[in-house]
Image (spheres, rainbow, N blue to C red):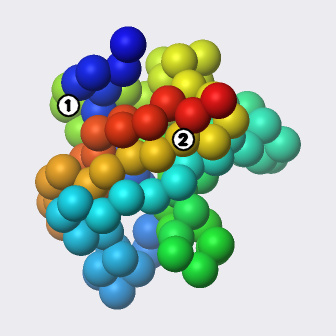
Amino acid sequence: MLDGLFVTVTGFKNAREMAVFTIGSRFICEKEPSNPYDDDAIRVVGPNGATVGYLANNAGTKAGGTLTASRLYDRVGSRFVIEVCFTTRTKIICRVEDPGE
């Protein structure tokens, strides 16, 4: 059961890129095992199919109370859904809504 699992989206460059993350909006997340920087990378896909961010994967980039991508990786399918709950100046906090397949 994934009730109450939260993640942090990071990896956007500025406020304009962050604007797509409105409270209540949903995004598809996709595991990216071929990512050259992180074997457990999970990208966040925007409405146009482009990458709009990544799930934070270390204590320095995630918000308190949220899981890193590595901690979530084996609990979700290769594609899953998150919903935006809160935003700060540098982070987007989302709830895992559908763990996918």
Q: Amino acid at mark 2?
A: Phe
Residue positioned 45% across, 58% down in the render: 27
Residue 6, image x, y percentages: 29, 33
Q: Position of residue 46 (x, y in %)?
A: 52, 70
Q: Amino acid at mark 1?
A: Gly
Q: CA distance from mark 2 to mark 1?
A: 22 Å
Look at mark 1 in the image and give the residue it sits on.
64
Q: Residue 13 bears which disc, if any? A: none
Choose between 32 and 12: the one closer to the eye: 32
Q: Quadrant of residue 62?
A: top left
Q: Which residue is mark 2?
A: 80
Q: Residue 78 placed where, x, y %?
A: 68, 35
Local secondary structure at mark 1? loop
Q: Residue at x 29, y 39 (%)?
A: 95
> How many marks do you count on the picture?
2
Mark 2 or 1 closer to N-term? 1
Residue 3 shown left or right of residue 78 in the figure: left
Q: Is residue 16 above or below residue 42?
A: below
Looking at the figure, which quarter contains the C terminus? top right
